[in-house]
Image: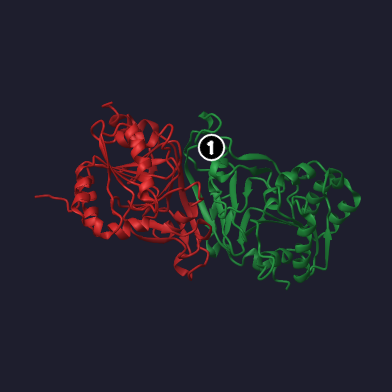
Chain colours: A red, B green
Amino acid sequence: MNMPIHPAPRGKLVAIGGAEDKDSETDILRQVLKFAPMPDPRVGVITTASSIPDEVFAVYRKVFERLGASEIMDIRIRERADATNAAMIDMIKQSDVIFISGGDQMRLTSIFGGSTALTAIRRRYEDGGVIAGTSAGAACQSTTMVYGGDAVDSLRKGAVRMTAGFGLIDGVIIDTHFLERGRFSRLMEVGATNPEYLGVGLGEDAAVLFDDDIIHAFGPGHVILVDSSGITGSNVFDLAEGEAVSVHNVTMHALVDGDAYSLSDRRVLKADERGTTILEKMNAYN
Amino acid sequence: MNMPIHPAPRGKLVAIGGAEDKDSETDILRQVLKFAPMPDPRVGVITTASSIPDEVFAVYRKVFERLGASEIMDIRIRERADATNAAMIDMIKQSDVIFISGGDQMRLTSIFGGSTALTAIRRRYEDGGVIAGTSAGAACQSTTMVYGGDAVDSLRKGAVRMTAGFGLIDGVIIDTHFLERGRFSRLMEVGATNPEYLGVGLGEDAAVLFDDDIIHAFGPGHVILVDSSGITGSNVFDLAEGEAVSVHNVTMHALVDGDAYSLSDRRVLKADERGTTILEKMNAYN
């Protein structure tokens, strides 16, 4: 017997930087539905992060209907008790695509953490489901999650707040609204504290598909990767709380639609290495 | 005869990221005065960039008085005619330190460009004067100057606006309010358009001294260096105006007070290479 302890997920994980177009071109959300292995998938929407969940659900119902979803389910998890509710768990199991809205990622982790609903989401991902999230719904996906710290204050020791996320993907830390809110310094601080983690800074209306070792960028916006694995110096361990953090030799990449990056090699793939991209392959059925 | 065409400046050039402390610790402005080769230097203040020049001059008069300047001159250049006024040129010649305030750097270049006042500033720098500027007064110092482009829109071809600056330093492009306004993407766009230029992104209450080949960081804030000389790919030449720019393998450094960088080697100096820093050496007289 040669069973891995953590079976590799066979689903698709999509992180979106927030403010994705829901009205006109809807490039990213259209692509998310195409990642499902069938046309007209069933979509379950989780609006737990939002303070106006009904309004947010109404917006996504409209756009997913327009994009051809066969069913759109409101997975109404508003407090911890809901996250063990059998009806909610059933909806998660029935969703071909689970879409997690924006809001406050701390609401997501504090309500879903350790719940049967989160276990069901992970199982759905391992079984081939598409898990997609925007803004808070993207930030929550990594094992360690950024949840706060003004960009203006960051690169000051302790400014960036982190906690444990949903654990759907290891080795990266996801940040959103990245160019629009100037969050480069947040991921530079994160990289100084632990250079092993690749910072994935998603601009608005930009997205990535995590496909095993490859990160595929898609959508009209930018994806900024912050690679601290080669840093040659930082003062971070010598500082008191609030002091200015230095960090030398951070590598950054600004990716656009169609670009791809190898996590294990820590490099952007050349055009001829991408070959027929996974996006093209997965769109082959329609 | 072996005369260089451009004699190397023997003065000191200081660029400040804006919003430097003028009231309490005043670390940066105190240091600026110490760069003069004598105690109690004469300071000439240029407020041309500002839309409220009298108020700005009053603030700097107060702080430079408190810091021991022996004389503080209001170099009142408000329009192009003033930039050839003999009384103004005399004040420039008499200043041990010339301080250029913030505001709009386009006012600076459009009023000073090609004037005898600018020639006098360059001459003063070559003759050993200290030239210091904050915000617009820092951005104007380089040969090519950034003057516009919202950080939110940048990394879109053509978003960052550039023109010719004062030409006091070659090989760098200076940006200010850098962390506070999230301008990383501006200098990434600049680097994609011409990787030869080192981007110098000055945070608020942060400064650099350009000392021949070495850039010294000082002050409480951060200095971000954006080195695009090793970039391995960019789509910038293939794009139409407004399309998303990609750029791969940009190297960034977050420097803090005391850090130093070699422009020709493109690397951060190690602590033992800095030896007694130039800041310490130049402060030896007091």
Q: Residue A13 appears at what percent x and percent y? A: 30, 44
Where's residue B221, x and y in %? 58, 61
Left/right placement of residue B250 relative to residue B159 reads: left
Can residue A8 be seen here? Answer: no
Q: Quadrant of the C terminus of chain B?
A: bottom right
Q: Tally the numbered discs.
A: 1
Along the line of sight, the residue nearer the viewer: A234 or A71: A71
- Mark 1, other Cα within 10 Å: few <14 / some 14–19 / many ≥20: many
Please name the residue shown 35% across and 44% down the image: A57
Q: Judge left or right: residue A61 versus residue B97.
A: left
Quadrant of the rendered image containing residue B190: top right
Q: Secondary structure at mark 1?
A: loop
In this view, A57 is above or below B43: above
- Residue at 77% in and 65% down: B37
Q: Position of residue A240 (x, y in %)?
A: 48, 71
Q: Residue furthest left?
A: A1
Q: Which residue is mark 1?
A: B156
Task: Identify the subunit bearing mark 1.
Answer: B
- For this rendering, which residue is in front, B59 or B46? B59
- Furthest residue toward right: B86
Observer-nearest residue: A282 or B117? A282
> On the rendered image, what quadrant is the N terminus of chain B found in?
top right
Q: Quick check: B266 left or right of B59?
A: left
Q: Position of residue A202 (x, y in %)?
A: 42, 45
Q: Residue at x 58, y 47 (%)?
A: B199
Residue A85 shows in this picture: yes
Instruction: Tell me the amino acid under the disc marked 1.
Output: Arg
